[in-house]
Image (cartoon, grey):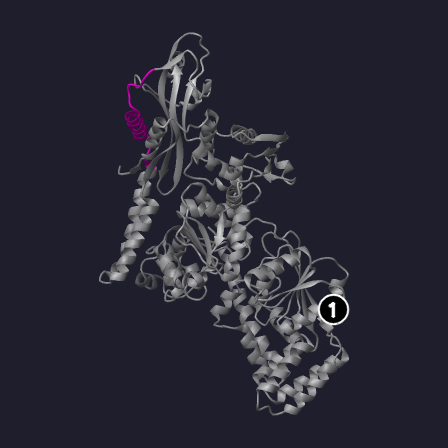
Amino acid sequence: MAIENLHKFLSDYFLANQCELLDNENGKVTIQLTDKMDELIMNRPFYWHYIKQIGQQGQPMKITFITNPDRQNEQGEWVHFGSPRLHQIFRTLSKQGKITRQYEQSGSVYRQPLIPWLVLNIKISYQGKHKKDELLSYGLQLINGTLVSPMMEKLSKLNLQPVIPDYCYTISPLIHNKSAYQRMIRYVQDYLRTKDYTWAKESWDHLYAEGKLLEHFYKEDQADKEKQNQLQQALSEIESRFRPRISIDIINGGLFYLSQESSNVVRSSS
Amino acid sequence: MNIQLNNDTAFIEELEDALQQDGPFSSWQLFQMSYQAAQTTLTPEFTGLTAPKHLPHMEFLPHQLDCARQIIEEMNGRGLLADEVGLGKTIEAGLILKEYMIRGLVKKALILVPASLVNQWVLELSQKFYIPAVSQGKRPVWDQNSIIVSSIDTAKRQPHRDIILEQEYDFILIDEAHKLKNHKTKNYEFVRALKKKYCLLLTATPVQNKLSDIFNLVSILKPGHLGNYEDFTANYGKDRNNLFNDEHLKQLIQKVMVRNRRQDTKVDWTERKVQTVWIAFSESEQQAYDELTSITSKADTFSSITLTRELCSSREACYLSMKKMLQQEKQIANREAYQDFLKVIEELPHHAKADKVVELIGNTDEKFIIFTEYRATQLYLQWYLQQHGISSVPYRGGFKRGKKDWMKQLFQNHAQVLIATEAGGEGINLQFCNNMINYDLPWNPMRLEQRIGRIHRFGQQQDVHIYNFALRNTMEEHVLNLLYEKIHLFERVVGNLDDILAELDIKDVEQEIQTIFRESETEGEAKIKLDNLSSVISLRQDQLQEQEDWDGNRESS
């Protein structure tokens, strides 16, 4: 699900933020920003502060992005996977897209229950001498405790909206969010136990070896307090550089109410 | 196994709050996009460089990618980056920093560089690597998460010093790190005391004089890697040649140092076309020169050599110095002769070299850099070129940083000629220009190397033309013939000359030559002495060359 079409991603982003696309062809798009988006990405806080002070209507900017590398010399900002603009947008997304609550629109005309799911998208970082990440997407059904992974791919096939559809009602969860969260973290830990830890062992060994070198380096200075402080600092530096650690970060998550049917589909194909 | 596990506990609280307050909630689309963004910024492998994918506008050379990979993967982010001049150490360092930032391993960095290079580093990091670096400025903020570029002299001074030493840096970079070779200096102690995770030391000359230089540099990166100081001197002695001769030491060093040399890089370097331009004084000038030589040889003062040199550069340079000398020095044996000579200078026509410059530049639109040793000549040339409709900008070591940048920009966009005095040497990169006139030759060959390095460096697309001006029948002729030609300075692309000079204990070639001219009774004697000096240098050069041919690429790994 990583971004494949950068142009579509950009256009979608601004549309989802209620901006108007003025011109959009062949890898070049011009966007009329809203006040809110201008404030968010154009880095001109003084202007907006001033406008608000004098109680005037601000003039949000138009901005042109180019994603087609063949056109990078034209008027506009070239956006690619490393450009600061894209990463700025990613940062806004990490806040804007963090917490959600969605209801499946099943289109049913009969009274129908919706079943609650807690969904968490989790980034695991493994860090020793080097670092790598992994993304997990878990869903936990809050009635019977079924765990599904990967969840996002399955949700993407459903029609989801922020309001509960007519004829539908939600079933109250039997599992509290917090304990569901605890369970999911336990699942993550179980998953982590299945991994290969050569990298961590190597890091420990390296840490140990460098620690020995340091002690040897300072061995003549055991009475020298200043030198001993240097040794302690050097030891803590290698510790922060090599000591293996794993971080679990929640990218985003939320409560999803799915129909009985979808709940079964999601579950069965896992 | 014991692995520290960090959990994100804040999220679930946030979610609970949102549910209790009935919002705000993200739309389904933004939620999905946020997930996509996370996937896109993921680094799924421990190894390999992801930074180049983020920098599609950059073309990295194989040795640069290799260097970055080696420092990150094999040296775990602490290394001595010791490529030869002009191979792109800045690029390699930027690549490494970028990689760590992408992987989320570096947020707070301190980059210590010579004051004259602060702006250039900031510019290169932000333009080439999209790294939001800031220069320390007047009121630096050290305690935030940011990438700060500062001069070491500012950083080590109070009140900055104490604040900086409290910070925990993810990444420290020291440019021109050979200045840290002495562990007793304040700079060394300061850098050693910095709290740091990753650390890069950049230098083109990792061993300048003594073998202990490298011990001190490595002890910043990885104390104990070479043992403690007693072990080190006991094992390897003090001779810097042991760095190449001792297999064990060589291997140890290779674990903390990357050193690429030009021939290792597989890059087609553009050619360096060096040409000596012989110029004859006009009759009246030659007469004046001879007269001055005879005046100065009668009363041998320190400035007498300088005066003759200056006359080879411009009337103005000589005139001003002479006048100053007459005013300041009370006891000059032949004061009258000098005073008369001032009148001779006033009568002289335009300098033969200046006419040559106009002849060379006048018919082309190409950009030229002119290097001169004297400020008076710089002013004169600027004026003289203007008279011939040639636009030029001056450049001096004494200019403030902002002014230097401004002059460089003027030269790049508007002026045809940049006239620099020395100290334009260290610092600015002018790859967009490929012609250089050495209006007067420095007597220190290293300075010439630095001058040429300003334009003949990585990024230069054209062949580089170097014109060395020399006046026939003057001391310039001797220096050029006997010193420069003999040590093949112009043919070599980049020098190990500084190593050789250090080894021969020649601290200052310029002073050496001055002494030769001053202490020689006759021109013939001066010639012989110059010749001897060059022979010593070139002999050592040949020896090294042989050894190198025999060793193959002994320093590359």
Q: Which residues, given as a range, are shown in magenta?
A: A171-198
What kind of secondary structure does the magenta stretch mostly adopt? helix
Q: Relative to B42, is B319 on the left or the right?
A: right
Where in the figure is residue B334, as x and y percent of width and height? 63, 91
Where in the figure is residue A97, as x and y percent of width and height? 44, 30
Is residue A182 within the magenta segment? yes
Q: Quadrant of the C terminus of chain A?
A: top left
Q: Could you tell me which residue is drawn at 27 percent across and 58 percent down?
A: A229
Viewer-side residue, B160 vs B339? B160
Where in the figure is residue A202, as x and y percent of width and height? 33, 41
The answer to whether B348 is drawn above or below residue A77 in the figure is: below
> Furthest residue to the front?
A55
Where in the figure is residue B79, as x and y percent of width and height? 42, 52
> Furthest residue to the left?
A223
Q: Amino acid at mark 1?
A: Lys
Q: Could you tell me which residue is drawn at 70 percent across and 60 percent down?
A: B416
Is residue B215 visible in the rendered image? The answer is no
Pointer 1: what residue?
A: B356
